[in-house]
Amino acid sequence: MSTAVEPRWEAPEAVDPPTTQGLRSAYARLCDVTGIRTAGWIALLGGAASLALGLVFGWLEFSVVGILAVATLALCVLFTIGKPKLEAWIQLTGRSVVVGERAAGLLHVRNAATRRNWGARLDLPVGENNASFSLPSLRAGEITSEEFRIPTSRRGLITVGPARSVQGDPFALTGRETRWTEELELYVHPVTVSLPGRQTGFVHDLEGHASSHLSSSDMNFHALRPYVAGDDRRHVHWRSTARTGRLMVRQFEESRMSRVAVCLDTGRSAYLDEEEFELGVSAAGSVALQTLYSESPLALLTSRETLVAVTPGRTLDELSLVQLTTRGGIADLVHSTIRRAPNSSVVFVVTGSSTSLATLRQACGRFDVDARVVGVRIASGAELRVRSAGNVTAVQLGRLEDLPRAMRKAME
C-alpha cells in the first residue's frame, strides 16, 4: 500500500532589487543612445501627459500643449544626428609652474573630415573651472588654435581636459558629448627661496663628518705614510719626502654625508590660517631643495606621511599636494620623525604660530644630542627671532624672504 507524499514547498529565490548605481548607469546609457537629456525627458513626459489628458477629457488646450512639446523634442533630436570628425590636442607651457606665475595652454583642433565643418562648441575643464570655445567653420584639414589661461593663485595639482564637443539643440533638451583629448596635469609648486650653500657655511654638517675609516682621497687630513704603488702622486707631501729621503703621501679620514630630515607639521590646529600654512610649506620646500642641491640624503616628512624626495622637481610635486589634516601637533611630529628617520644628523622642524617658541624648543630637545635641530615657528608678519641653546635652535619666521638670514644665524 503506497502512501501519498506531500509536495515540498520551496520559497522562490530572492531577487536583489536594482541598486541606485545600477539605475543611474542604465539611465546614462539611455541618454547616450537617444541623445535626450533630462530636460528633454521631462518635456516628453509632460507633453505625453498633456496630450493624454486632452484626448480623454476633450481639453483642446492640453492637446495643443502636448503636441507642441512632442514635436519640439522630435525637432531637437535632429540636431544630434551625425558626428563631427575632429582631431584635438592640448598643449601646455610646461608641466609645472610656481604659485602666481602665468600659465596658459593651447587647444588645437583639426577638421579630419573630407568636407567642411560648420562649427561646433568645445568645453574644456580647467581645474574647477570650465572653458568653452566656439569653433569657427573649418575646411577639410584646416587647423584652429584657441588659447586659455590656467589659474595659479593656489598651490596644488590642476587637471586640464578632456576636451569635449557638445552637439545639441539651442534649448538644451538634447545633446551628445564626444571626448577628443586626454587629461593633462599641471603642478603649481610652492614659492621657495635660495638658501646659502656650503660655500657660505649653510649647515656645516652637510659637508660631512669624519669617520674612523681611512681613505686615500677625501677632505679631512689624518696622517702621513710611505708611498706605495698606485697612490695618487698629487697627494705626495714633498717637504716630508725631502726630510725623510723617501716618498711620503697624505692619508685622509673618510667623510660621510649627513642625513637631513625636514619635517612639516600639517595639523590644522597648528596654524592660524591658510596663509600661514603656505608659508610653512614654502620654508620646508626651500630647505629641502638646498639639501638636494648639496647632494645630501634627505627625508621629507609630514604629520601623516613620508614624501618622495629624490629630485628637486619630484619634491616640489609632492609638496604641491600637501594639505592640512586633522592630525598634527609638534609633539606628534617630533615623535613620528624620531621613529621614521632615526639616523638624521640635521633636523628641520616646521610648525605654526599656535606653538610657542618655548614649546618648540622643548619638543626639539627630544632628538638625539648629536643631531643639529632647527625648529621653525611660522607666524605671518612677525619679526625674525633666532635663539640657540645647545644643539637646538628655535626660529620665528614671519616672511619667506627672511629665511636665508635665519639659516645663517642658526648655523653660526
Image (spheres, grey):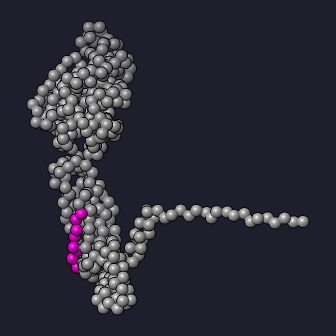
Does residue 406 sit above or below 308 in this rendering?
A: above
Give yes or no for residue 172 being in the magenta stretch: no
**Residue 198 in view in this figure:** no
**Position of the C terminus by quadrant:** top left
Q: Nearer the viewer, residue 203 or 44?
A: 44
Q: Residue at x 11, y 29 (%)?
A: 384
Q: Residue 257 appears in which quarter of the rendering?
A: top left
Write down the region rendered in magenta: 130-138
Determine whether, in the image, residue 50 is placed left or right of residue 412.
right
Q: Residue at x 38, y 73 (%)?
A: 31
Q: Nearer the viewer, residue 198 or 44?
A: 44
Q: Residue 64 appears in which quarter of the rendering?
A: bottom left
Q: Nearer the viewer, residue 99 or 138?
A: 99
- Which secondary structure is most common in the magenta stretch? strand
**Position of the N terminus by quadrant:** bottom right
Outermost residue toward the right in this view: 1
Question: At which x and y percent is residue 93?
Answer: 22, 57
Give yes or no for residue 131 being in the magenta stretch: yes
Q: Nearer the viewer, residue 129 or 165?
A: 129
Question: At which x and y percent is residue 254?
Answer: 33, 21
Question: At which x and y percent is residue 365?
Answer: 27, 21
Q: Residue 169 appears in which quarter of the rendering?
A: bottom left
Question: At which x and y percent is residue 219?
Answer: 27, 22
Q: Residue at x 64, y 63 (%)?
A: 11
Outermost residue toward the top in this view: 244
Q: Residue at x 23, y 32 (%)?
A: 350
Does residue 12 sit above or below 322 in this rendering?
A: below
Determine whether, in the image, residue 64 is placed left or right of residue 151.
right
